Amino acid sequence: MLEAQKKPVHLYMEANPNPNSLKFVANFMLAEDGVSFDFPDEQSAANSPLALELFNFAAVERVFIASNFVTVTKNADVPWENIQDHIRNHMKGYLETGKQAITTQFEGGDPLFDENDSEVVKKIKGILDEYIRPAVEQDGGAIVFHSFQDGIVKVLLQGSCSGCPSSTVTLKAGIENLLTRMLPEVKSVEAEGV
């Protein structure tokens, strides 16, 4: 009987500004480009068998999956040195079997744009997608448009951005500065649900 060949999986780890998060980068796509999945707890991870498995590690508090990476946020009391290799090896073994990281993919048009958006909201989303998303994904997170009202842009912080000590600086000095400079309608940017 022939044994099924394992899929070649290469995972490397990257630190990011959040000391409690670590980014595990794969050599292939885990989710559609531009679509991210944030699992703040095990109950929210029903559509991700990989996230469910990662929550079996007692120190894992949050799992975020986007494009070709998984960001794991751990309990602050546990040093990365004690668990990072175990998590990476488990994830590598899981992916080598050919199992999917996400079982539900986004269906429909572009998840970022809605034809009912106002012109200002379309511009805000475009700036977030073109200028902000690539930089934030490099750090293992995502900042997603939530709403725009009375000059205030509200965004959701996901992955390593959620709970990151430097996220307020990124939000105000980076994103707010860029949006207020490019769009006079924008007065400030706030994080929703933080």
Image (cartoon, rainbow, N blue to C red):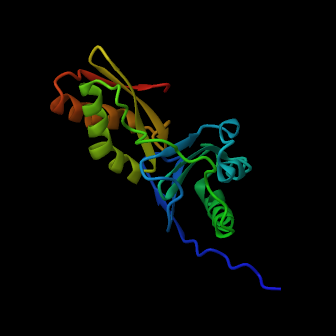
Task: Looking at this view, name the residue that lies furthest to the bottom.
Answer: 1
Task: Looking at this view, name the residue that lies furthest to the right.
Answer: 1
Q: Position of residue 131 (x, y in %)?
A: 27, 45
| Residue 23 visible to the viewer | no
Of residues 136 and 31, the one nearer the viewer is 31
Looking at the image, which residue is at 49% across and 47% down?
19
Quarter in which the N terminus is drawn: bottom right
Q: Position of residue 84 (x, y in %)?
A: 61, 60
**Can you tell which quarter of the image residue 2 is in?**
bottom right
Q: Position of residue 125 (x, y in %)?
A: 31, 35
**Can you tell which quarter of the image residue 182 is in?**
top left
Looking at the image, which residue is at 77% across and 82% down?
3
Looking at the image, which residue is at 65% across and 66% down?
98
Q: Position of residue 171 (x, y in %)?
A: 33, 33
Left or right of 97 in this view: 14: left
On screen, 117 above or below 169?
above
| Residue 145 visible to the viewer | yes
Of residues 41 and 19, the one nearer the viewer is 41
Q: How many marks?
A: 0
On screen, 149 above or below 90?
above
Looking at the image, which residue is at 25% across and 33% down?
123
